[in-house]
Image (cartoon, rainbow, N blue to C red):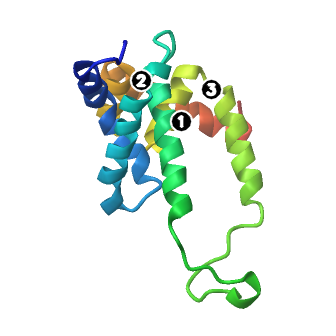
Amino acid sequence: MDISDEEALGECYRTHAPSVRSYLRRFVPAEEVEDLLQVVFAEVWRSRGRYDPGRSQAAWVFAIAHRRAVDHLRVRRLLTVPLQEAGDLPGRARPAPDALGDRDQIDRALAELSDAQRQAIELAYFADLTQREIAEHLRVPIGTVKARISRGLHRLSDLLAGTA
């Protein structure tokens, strides 16, 4: 789709805004999501000349959203405390020592799934999309999304348990 006019931008917004909004919720406070969403689509408009219609429009929009979320987080000033002074915070459990190993194991197991299953699971669990949003995003029936997620999670469970 050539996004060179306002009508095309409107279509791009209608198609991708719900999933981009869900994606941004993972990074910024809820009260800042709508503002950042507008920043993302303003950049989509400004950089429309760089869009290659031969490539995925969703990937292009999500790349912009990711960059703007990172930029947004960089400019926020958060209170930091030196580690020596932090000690063990009351009421907070320390992460498990092998948490990074678990993450690596999950990444390897995800790589073993079919592309369709992995994409559906990533959109559901990492982009925080509903099954209906995933179906709209992938342009497949919701039953297909449910089947991909279900089969993918079963396969993932087998892989992580070492039975696959």
Label 3: state its secondary structure. loop
Sequence-wise first label, 1 or 3: 3
Q: Is residue 74 left or right of residue 57?
A: right
Residue 84 location in percent, x, y? 77, 87
Q: Is residue 6 left or right of residue 87?
A: left
The three-letter amino acid code for the residue at tag 2 is Arg
Write down the quadrant of residue 93 in the picture: bottom right
Write down the quadrant of residue 45 in the picture: top left
The three-letter amino acid code for the residue at tag 1 is Leu
Residue under the image location 65 percent in, 36 percent down: 158
Q: What is the number of callouts on the image?
A: 3
Graded by Cα atoms within 10 Å as few (under 14), some (14 to 19) or many (20 or more), the crowding at tag 2 reads some
Residue at mark 2? 48
Gap between marks 2 and 3, in whole Å? 34 Å
Q: Is residue 158 left or right of residue 65?
A: right
Looking at the rendered image, the quarter that the C terminus falls into is top right
- Disc nearest the viewer among 2 and 3: 2
Sequence-wise first label, 1 or 2: 2
Residue 26 location in percent, x, y? 45, 53
Label 2: state its secondary structure. helix
* Label drawn at residue 153: 1
Q: Nearer the viewer, residue 143 or 134?
A: 134
Residue 151 in view, yes or no: no
